[in-house]
Amino acid sequence: MYWYGEEIRAYRREVRALLAEPPVRAELDALHERPGTDPDVRALYRELGRRGLLAVNWPARYGGEGRALLDAAVAGEELARAGVPDTLYVNTVQIVGLFLLMAGSEQQKATHLPPLARGERFASVLYTEPGSGSDLGSLSTTAVADEGGGWRLSGVKAFHMKSDLTDIGLCAARTGPAGGRYDGISLFIVDLHAPGVHRRTIGSIADEQFHRIEFDEVQLAPGDLLGPENGGWPLLTQALAIERTGLDYSLKAENWLAAAGAALGPDADAAVCEEVGRYGAAVDGSRLLSWEVLEGLAADRLDESLAAAAKFYCGELAARIGRWAPTRVTGPLPERRAAVLEAAYREAPGLTVAAGTSEMMLEIVASLALDGLAKEAAAW
């Protein structure tokens, strides 16, 4: 495997050295000292951007480092292990940045990508609506064409994170008649500081709070359309499959299990130690599965069923560890470690819903597997 080679190990050492530099460590330490559980991490991301650790595989002309996709995965692993909160990274770089690279015009790429790569601007993913959940085919936000060639955006997006800090949003809206559930959907890059954009917080039991954004006749320019008009659904399905490597969930599972294992003393219960060992093997397996998806993407092979299986397995595993660790690892713990386990317990329920529910992932795996069997049967 590529990730065992000397070249990738050398890059991993380079990333670790950059993360150990005093300005980065100072910002990481400051996160633990700030009051509240949902701190502003933008100063930390600016330090990461200065060191080229955010948009690792983007072309240099767009602010990236021009490295391979698997190098970006290595950087993502090391960011997580260093304690860097990942929500802004995932949304800004791995999702919105990916869409811009896939479907953006040259002007859109030149305008938006460099400041995202530098950690100077941030992005939200605005798919989910109060009444539609994960079912994008039922979205009701509209973008109505106006005489100037642009659109007027109206509707509500909800249950996204860090949207109080972001500057632009990747927004799915209806622009045409719905001949089918997934027809007439377009994607826009929306300025979240524009008139008519109203944001507020939705309380959550997790450390990171949800947000709600209301669009009240927000003016969109012709250049805000991402990809073809009414052609958003094919882009969404392609990008969602690419996003679902499971690596971010595998890293959560690894982090939470490490916190639990480190809390066990020499007199730890044998049954708990056995459970730690079993979960450790499962975490290693989840990482192997995620990297199999990543290596396929690096070779321009998109296996949607494997990606869905990775998201399902890694998300379910992280959720199980998040629920298990605080209930089985008992006794006095250092404050920071106890905070990690307590936060994991509250975050765990959402892991099987975010980025596509576990039920949706199983449906994708089953339907694609059945399609494959039908094709094999037809060829006999």
Image (cartoon, rainbow, N blue to C red):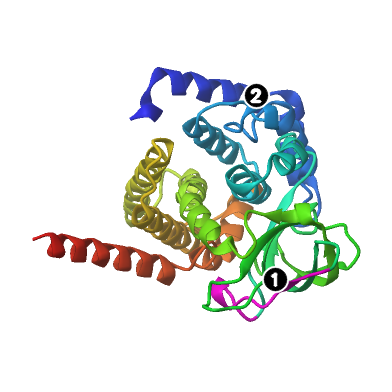
The quadrant the N terminus occupies is top left
Residue lying at the far right in this picture: please name it: 195
The quadrant the C terminus occupies is bottom left
Label 1 sits on a secondary structure element that is strand
| Amino acid type shown at disc 1 | Ala
**Residue 321 as seen in the image, left or right of residue 67:** left
Image location (x, y in percent) of residue 184: 60, 71
**Residue 138 as seen in the image, left or right of residue 249:** right
Q: Nearer the viewer, mark 2 or mark 1?
A: 1
Q: Give the mark nearest the N terminus, 2 or 1.
A: 2
Q: Which residues are magenta?
A: 131-146
Q: Residue at x 58, y 62 (%)?
A: 231
Q: Nearer the viewer, residue 76 or 208?
A: 76
Look at mark 2 in the image and give the residue it sits on: 18
Rounded to the nearest whole Å, what is the CA distance between mark 2 and mark 1?
Answer: 36 Å
252 w.r.t. 12: above or below:
below
Image location (x, y in percent) of residue 281: 32, 46
| Amino acid type shown at disc 2 | Leu
**Residue 328 as seen in the image, left or right of residue 184:** left
Res 38 seen here: no
Residue 158, labelled with which disc?
A: 1
Q: Nearer the viewer, residue 209 or 65?
A: 65
Label 2 sits on a secondary structure element that is helix
Image location (x, y in percent) of residue 71: 51, 30
Q: Residues within 10 Å of mark 2 (few under 14, many from 20)?
A: some
Q: Residue at x 60, y 48 (%)?
A: 103
Res 212 seen here: yes
16 w.r.t. 271: above or below:
above
For the residues labelled 2 and 1, say whether their Cβ atoms are less than 8 Å apart. Answer: no
Q: Is residue 82 magenta?
A: no
